[in-house]
Image: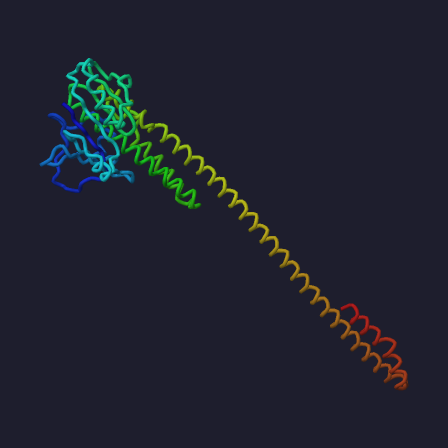
Amino acid sequence: MKMYAYITAGGNGNSDLAPLRIGKGKVSFFIKPLKNYCHFSQHPQNPDTWYLTFFNQTEFAIDLTVRVMKEPMPKDEALANRVLAKAVWFNNEFQSSNNEKFAEDMSQFLRGSSALTMDKLIPTTHGHHLVTDRNGLAYLSGNADQFKRIVLCLSLAVAYSQILRRCEERLTFALKRREYDSLPELYENILFFNASDYFSHPVSLDRHELFAVWKLIRDHWHIDEINEELTEQLAGVSSLLKEHREQEAAKFRLEAAERKRNAEKAADERRMIAEKKEQRKDRKFNVTIGIASLVVGIFSIISLVEITPTHFKQAYQNWVTPVIENMSDSE
């Protein structure tokens, strides 16, 4: 007996969907901080079609669709649906000795060739084995419901991977276009996402096999490494931007101080020019007063002493003319 599952992007906004049930119960193996912000449902008429929403009520909410099938999806249909990940279950009836007969089908499903060997199988518990390869996995056990839970774990890995890759694309796009203003917000969102929605161990510890399976899936998809790399890149860029802005601010302050000094210098120069003009006006005024006084004195002397016009002309040339010429030269 076999079972296949295919994970694609997108969901269904139908409000009539029923809560997803595996076996006789709801999904309950994820830890509460994750489960409380996820929504899993299935089509009432087709319970093998699941609609999953991870990280609900956040900027990074993501919708996925899972189709559980008894036969593998044709390649052209898989390409048309842009399958993000796939999984297959082989019923080994809890007997590891039965695994060998599924070797060829397992390799063809995951690689499209016979290159995948049985030594890649990892035991997860007695009679249960798992192999992760490329964008898929194969699970060999006698428990179909456990396979469905493992598909949910794979779906979570796909959701994490999709979000991190999108953020990497946004980072690269912003850097290539020098659109730095959007990067601090992206860095802040990633930090919030890591604090509230990203979990290296999202499966409850008491679910022994699922806990082990999640670690195998997480490591195969390199989720922790990608998250760490992205966070470090954003931190480095944010630090560089902060330093650049501080340098720009310091440069602006220096330029403002220089403009202020230049303005003060220009004001001082204008004040000095104005003072010199006032001084020249004062000198002209004093000379005028002096000349007037001299003329008055001369007329006073004329009134007392008989002086001819010739005497007056000589006095003007000797006393007044040199003073006026000297004042003109000094200006």
Quarter of the figure with residue 161: top left
Residue in the image at 71% along x and 64% along y: 276
Residue 281 coordinates in the image, percent (x, y): 71, 70
Which quadrant of the rendered structure holds the C terminus? bottom right
Residue in the image at 39% along x and 43% along y: 173
Residue in the image at 57% along x and 47% along y: 254
Residue 288 coordinates in the image, percent (x, y): 76, 75
Which quadrant of the rendered structure holds the N terminus? top left
Of the pair 186 and 300, the residue shown nearer to us: 186
Of the pair 315 and 41, the residue shown nearer to us: 41
Q: Is residue 271 left or right of residue 183?
A: right
Of the pair 261 and 279, the residue shown nearer to us: 261
Residue 218 coordinates in the image, percent (x, y): 30, 26
Of the pair 324 and 225, the residue shown nearer to us: 225
Quarter of the figure with residue 91: top left
Residue 212 coordinates in the image, percent (x, y): 26, 20
In the displayed structure, would residue 310 be above or below residue 144?
below
In the displayed structure, would residue 115 be above or below residue 256?
above
In the displayed structure, would residue 297 be above or below residue 132?
below
